[in-house]
Amino acid sequence: MYIGRIMRTDLVTVPPEMPLAEARELIDQKGIEHLLVVNKDGRLVGVVSDRDLRQHWASSATSLSSHELNYLLSKVTMAMIMRKKIVTITPDTTIERAAMIIQEKRIGSLPVMENDRLVGIITRTDVLKVLLDAIGIAEGSVRFQVIIRDRLGALAEIARILSTEGINIQSLISWPVEEHPGVFQLVMRVAARDLDTAVKSLETGGFVVLTRHVKDFTPYIPAP
């Protein structure tokens, strides 16, 4: 899936001179986590998160009067607190790549640029939701693991066995078993009502199926 299909395009942008208090009110009103700071030329110059706003907001323990506090806060602008080193992506970036960038850079959002023009934004929350949807986590579904050796036709055989039983694979993810080269765990999800039939039919077909967590895969590794 590409970012261009899931990015938010109803962008909330603010000028660099917007005061901190106004920005905090706006972010609460819109129910968002990030503000995109755009200059008069329409160029993206910074990003401010709700966390940035909280960090620069005065502590309740301050000895200043409310008048003094409001005066000082009115002097703090987005230009003073925004992150100027912005990591951006394009609409044709994959969701997996966006997730990796967010994790590696430890950031909460990625503005989306196309031909030097701001066209969208994707947040950590958005990415997580899409990945959870892709995994197939939903009410009424359950997961199990099939341990296989990397061989041609294994996945097709699993799909054939389950389809013969009328069982639909809701999602499937493959992970290598690191301590056993050439061995993979297929993490699958099916409807809860189909679990017992799926496990029984796959085991009858010669596959190793796990429905619980194990620390050591060694006893379950199929013979070469």
Image (cartoon, rainbow, N blue to C red):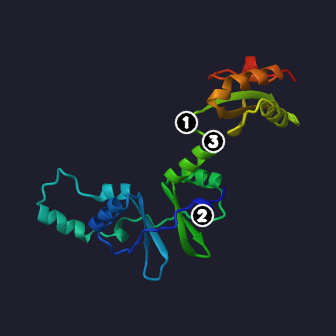
Q: Residue at x 60, y 64 (%)?
A: 89
Q: Are marks 3 and 1 in contact (CB under 8 Å)?
A: no
Instruction: Give the x, y percent position of residue 196.
Output: 68, 22
Q: Is residue 178 left or right of residue 48?
A: right
Q: Quadrant of residue 222?
A: top right
In the image, 10: left or right of 192?
Answer: left
Say which label, 3 or 2, has the lower sequence index: 2
Expressed as whole percent of the image width and height from the top left, the position of residue 43 reads: 49, 77
- Residue depicted at x 49% and y 54%: 107
**Position above or below: 43 against 182:** below
Nearest to the eye among marks 1 and 2: give it. 1
Is residue 58 shown to the viewer in this render? yes
The amino acid type, in three-letter code, at marker 1 is: Glu
Residue 135 numbered tag? 3
Please give the name of the residue rendered at 54% of the width and 48% of the height, measured from the top-left corner.
129
The residue at which mark 2 appears reads as 89
Residue lying at the far front of the rendered structure: 166
Q: CA distance from mark 3 to mark 1?
A: 13 Å
Q: Quadrant of the C terminus?
A: top right
**How many neighbours does mark 3 have within 10 angstroms: few (below 14), some (14-19), or many (20 or more)?**
some
Q: CA–CA distance between discs 1 and 2?
A: 33 Å
Residue at the image position 66 percent from the left and 55 percent from the top: 1
Residue position for label 1: 139
- Which of the 4 quarters of the picture holds residue 168? top right
| x and y, in percent, of residue 158 in the image | 80, 32
Residue 163: numbered disc: none
Whether residue 180 appears in this view of the structure is: no
Marks 3 and 2, how far apart at CA: 23 Å
Direction bottom: furthest residue: 41
Numbered disc in front, either 3 or 1: 1
The amino acid at mark 2 is: Ile
